[in-house]
């Protein structure tokens, strides 16, 4: 099972294998539907922990640069699906999330968590949703937690649209323009790893910056 999952992951993050997949196995609109479904599932079904995300979009850009996909159509489609996925995650959290916290306080769940989440998104929600699109794992749960915290829908939607559009456009165009560079194609796996590291870097920097303040507060 695990080897099969890894092989599928490699097929989605390798230009040659993805081109083969889209041209011989899943052709025409089925190929677009596959990519759209993956982007939607990352946040809409809270399955982002198991999906390639940034590296997939970069690879899709490389494939579009090779003439196998229409770059304008793929950006429009995947941006729409990214926003739609976040909408699904938001409503899942808004309708079902609070029920998790209605139980009496325990070691894992406390009523205060919901209040803190709501206050956090009221103050930082907009930029959090935009930044979260570029951070693996965080982008999967950010819309859900915005719903749990009862963030105002209009506020959520405005930042959600800009975040989804910016994420898909930047990652896809990066692959589109950089994928034709020989050094990038010859070291594609390293480039993909670099993208993954760059994605989590803001989260690491934020943690390191907040750590001294946390230690000082504890003292």
Image (spheres, helix red, strand yellow):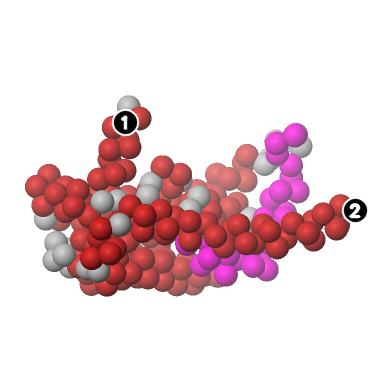
Q: Which residue is drawn at 13% across and 66% down?
A: 67
Q: Distance between the residues labelled 1 and 2?
A: 48 Å
Residue at the left extreme? 24
Across and down, in percent, residue 163 comes to 46, 68
The region drawn magenta spans 106-134
> Can residue 35 be found in the magenta stretch?
no
Q: Name the residue under label 1.
A: 3
Pointers 1 and 2 in contact (C-beta within 8 Å)? no
Side of 47 relative to 123 (left or right): left
Q: Residue at x 9, y 47 (%)?
A: 24
Do we see residue 143 in this rendering?
no
> For numbered disc 2, what is the local secondary structure?
loop
Across and down, in percent, residue 4 comes to 28, 32
Mark found first going from the N terminus, 1 or 2: 1
Q: Name the residue under label 2.
A: 219
Residue at the right extreme? 219
Q: Is residue 168 shown above or below 97?
A: below
Number of numbered discs on residues: 2
């Amino acid at each position: 099972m695990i080897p099969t999952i890894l092989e599928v992951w490699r097929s989605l993050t390798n230009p040659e294998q993805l081109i083969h997949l889209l041209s011989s196995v899943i052709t025409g609109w089925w190929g677009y539907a596959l990519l759209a479904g993956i982007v939607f599932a990352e946040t809409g079904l809270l399955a982002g922990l198991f999906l390639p995300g940034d590296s997939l979009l970069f690879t899709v850009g490389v494939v579009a640069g090779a003439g196998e996909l229409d770059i304008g159509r793929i950006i429009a489609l995947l941006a729409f699906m990214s926003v739609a996925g976040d909408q699904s995650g938001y409503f899942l959290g808004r309708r079902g999330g609070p029920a998790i916290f209605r139980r009496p306080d325990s070691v894992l769940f406390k009523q205060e968590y919901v209040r803190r989440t709501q206050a956090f998104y009221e103050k930082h929600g907009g930029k959090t949703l935009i930044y979260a699109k570029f951070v693996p794992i965080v982008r999967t749960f950010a819309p859900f937690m915005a719903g749990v915290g009862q963030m105002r829908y209009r506020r959520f939607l405005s930042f959600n649209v800009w975040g989804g559009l910016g994420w898909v456009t930047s990652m896809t165009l990066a692959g589109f323009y950089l994928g034709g560079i020989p050094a990038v194609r010859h070291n594609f796996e390293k480039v993909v790893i670099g993208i993954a590291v760059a994605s989590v870097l803001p989260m690491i920097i934020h943690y390191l910056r907040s750590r001294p303040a946390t230690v000082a507060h504890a003292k």
